C-alpha cells in the first residue's frame, strides 16, 4: 500500500495527502513548514493569525505522529518561538529526545538578542525501541592553518581519528550562502543537514516523509543515501524542480559498504559504528598526536561520488533548464522578485540568476 506513494513528490495540500498514508508506515517524518514570517512563497501566503497558524500546525503534526512507525523518529524544524508550542503539543503524543540547535543566523526579530539558531525538535514515536545511531563529524580546524580549534592539551593522541561525536549543537553546517547554489525557493535547506538526520535515524531502504518538500532537499538526501522518500508540496513549480534534481541523483553516497554524507570534497557525517569499515579509506596521522595539524584524509579521491558537488551541478543544470524554458517563465522572472529569506535579508531576482 505504502509502495504506491514512495519515491514520489506528490503535489497538493499536505493535510489532504496525509489521508493516503497508513498508520505506522514510515520510518521518519521531517517537517520544515512555512514559519509564518510572510516569506515570499509562490503558492502560499505565510501570514496566518497566531492561533490560526498553531491550529494548522497541530493538524499536520498529529498526522506526522500517526504515520510514523513505533520504531521511528519525528523531526520539526522551525524558529524557537514556534518550537516551544510544537513541543508542548508533541509531548502529549511522542517522546522528546533532543532540541537540536542549528547555529545559523535567522531573520532579525525584536530588539533584544540577535537570533542565531534554528531548532530541530527530535522526538521518537515511542520511548523505547527507536532506531538511533551515534554520529561523528570531522574535528573543527582553523581554516587557514589547519590546526585543531579546541585545545586538547596532552590528550591529542587519544582523539578519534575522524572526529568527535555529534552533539545537539550543530555549528558545522552552513546555510546555502551563494545565490548560484540556490534553487529559486526562499528557504531551501542544505542537503547535508538532512543527511545527518537521516543517517542518525534510518537504515538503507527505510522511508522518510516530508510534508513540506520545497525543492526536494529531504528527498534528494534520502535517495543519495539509499533510502526511500515521500514528499508533499503545494507548489507545482517546486515539485518540478525537485523532480528534475531527483532524476540526476544516484544512491551513491557510500564509501565501501557504509553510507556517508559528502559535502564538496569531504565527508561531513559518518555513523560511529561504521568507522571500523571506513578507516581503511583514510590516511590517518601517524603518530596520532600529529592530528593537531594534520587531518585524516580520504586516500583515493576517486571514491568521492561525482555528484558530491550536487548542489552546484544541479543548480547549473537548473539554470540551463530555466534558460531553455518557456518565455513565460522568463517574463515572470523579470518581474517577480524572489526574496531570499536566509540570513542576509538579500533580495535576488531570478532573472539575475540565469544571466
Ligand atoms: C520552508 S519551505 C520547505 C523548504 C524545503 N525544506 C527545502 O529545503 O526546499 C515550506 C514549503 O511548504 C510548502 N507548503 C506550504 N503550505 C503547504 C501545504 N499546505 N501543503 C504542502 N506544502 C505546503 C511551501 O510551498 C514551501 O515550499
Image (cartoon, rainbow, N blue to C red):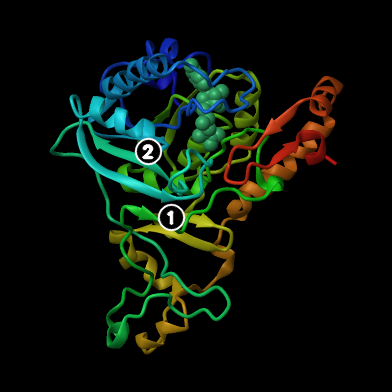
Q: Nearer the viewer, residue 87 or 69?
A: 87
Whether residue 29 is visible: no
Please give the label number shown on residue 146: none
Query: Where does the image place residue 308, in percent across and percent down from the top left?
Result: 58, 54
Which mark is first along the chain, 1 or 2?
2
Residue at disc 1, secondary structure = loop
Q: Which residue is more in the foreground, 148 or 251?
A: 148
Residue projecting furthest to the front: 111
Q: Quadrant of the C terminus?
A: top right
Taking the spot 69% from the left edge, 43% from the top edge, the residue there is 315
Q: Residue 146 versus residue 58: which sits nearer the camera?
A: 58
Q: Quadrant of the N terminus?
A: top left
Q: Residues within 10 Å of mark 2 (few under 14, many from 20)?
A: some
Q: Residues within 10 Å of mark 1 (few under 14, many from 20)?
A: many
Q: Is residue 154 above or below residue 2?
A: below
- Residue linked to disc 1: 260
Residue 226 point in image, percent of width and height: 44, 42
The alpha-carbon separation of the residues under discs 2 and 1 comes to: 29 Å
Q: Which residue is mark 2?
A: 80
Q: Residue at x 82, y 34 (%)?
A: 351
**Image side of residue 211 versus residue 69, left or right:** right
Q: Residue at x 60, y 37 (%)?
A: 341
Amino acid at each position: 500500500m505504502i509502495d504506491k506513494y514512495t519515491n514520489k513528490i506528490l503535489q497538493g495540500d499536505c493535510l489532504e495527502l496525509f489521508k493516503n498514508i497508513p498508520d505506522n508506515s514510515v520510518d521518519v517524518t521531517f517537517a520544515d513548514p512555512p514559519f509564518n514570517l510572510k516569506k515570499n512563497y509562490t503558492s502560499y501566503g505565510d501570514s496566518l493569525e497566531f492561533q490560526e497558524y498553531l491550529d494548522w500546525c497541530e493538524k499536520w503534526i498529529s498526522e506526522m505522529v500517526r504515520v510514523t512507525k513505533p520504531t521511528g523518529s519525528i523531526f520539526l524544524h522551525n524558529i524557537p518561538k514556534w518550537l516551544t508550542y510544537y513541543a508542548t503539543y508533541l509531548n502529549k503524543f511522542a517522546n522528546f529526545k533532543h532540541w537540536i540547535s542549528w547555529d545559523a543566523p535567522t531573520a532579525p526579530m525584536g530588539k533584544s538578542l540577535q537570533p542565531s539558531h534554528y531548532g530541530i525538535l527530535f522526538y521518537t514515536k515511542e520511548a523505547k525501541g527507536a532506531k538511533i545511531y551515534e554520529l561523528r563529524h570531522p574535528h573543527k580546524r582553523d581554516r587557514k592553518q589547519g590546526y585543531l580549534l579546541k585545545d586538547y592539551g596532552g590528550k591529542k593522541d587519544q582523539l578519534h581519528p575522524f572526529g568527535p561525536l555529534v552533539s545537539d549543537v550543530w555549528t558545522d553546517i552552513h546555510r546555502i550562502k551563494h545565490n548560484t547554489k540556490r534553487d529559486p525557493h526562499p528557504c531551501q535547506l542544505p542537503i547535508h543537514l538532512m543527511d545527518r538526520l537521516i543517517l542518525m535515524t534510518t537504515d538503507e531502504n527505510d522511508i522518510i516523509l516530508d510534508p513540506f518538500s520545497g525543492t526536494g532537499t529531504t528527498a534528494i538526501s534520502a535517495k543519495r543515501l539509499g533510502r526511500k522518500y515521500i514528499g508533499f508540496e503545494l507548489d507545482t513549480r517546486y515539485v518540478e524542480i525537485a523532480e528534475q534534481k531527483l532524476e540526476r541523483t544516484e544512491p551513491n553516497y557510500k564509501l565501501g559498504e557504509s553510507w556517508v554524507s559528502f559535502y564538496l570534497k569531504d565527508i561531513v557525517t559518518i555513523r560511529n559504528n561504521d568507522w571500523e569499515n571506513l578507516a581503511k579509506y583514510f590516511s590517518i596521522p601517524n603518530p596520532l598526536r600529529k592530528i593537531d595539524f594534520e587531518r585524516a584524509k580520504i586516500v583515493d579521491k576517486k571514491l568521492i561520488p561525482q555528484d558530491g558537488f550536487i548542489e552546484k551541478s544541479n543548480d547549473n543544470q537548473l539554470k540551463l533548464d530555466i534558460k531553455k524554458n518557456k518565455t513565460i517563465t522568463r517574463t515572470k522572472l523579470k518581474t517577480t522578485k524572489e526574496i531570499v529569506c536566509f540570513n542576509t535579508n538579500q533580495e535576488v531576482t531570478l532573472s539575475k540568476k540565469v544571466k
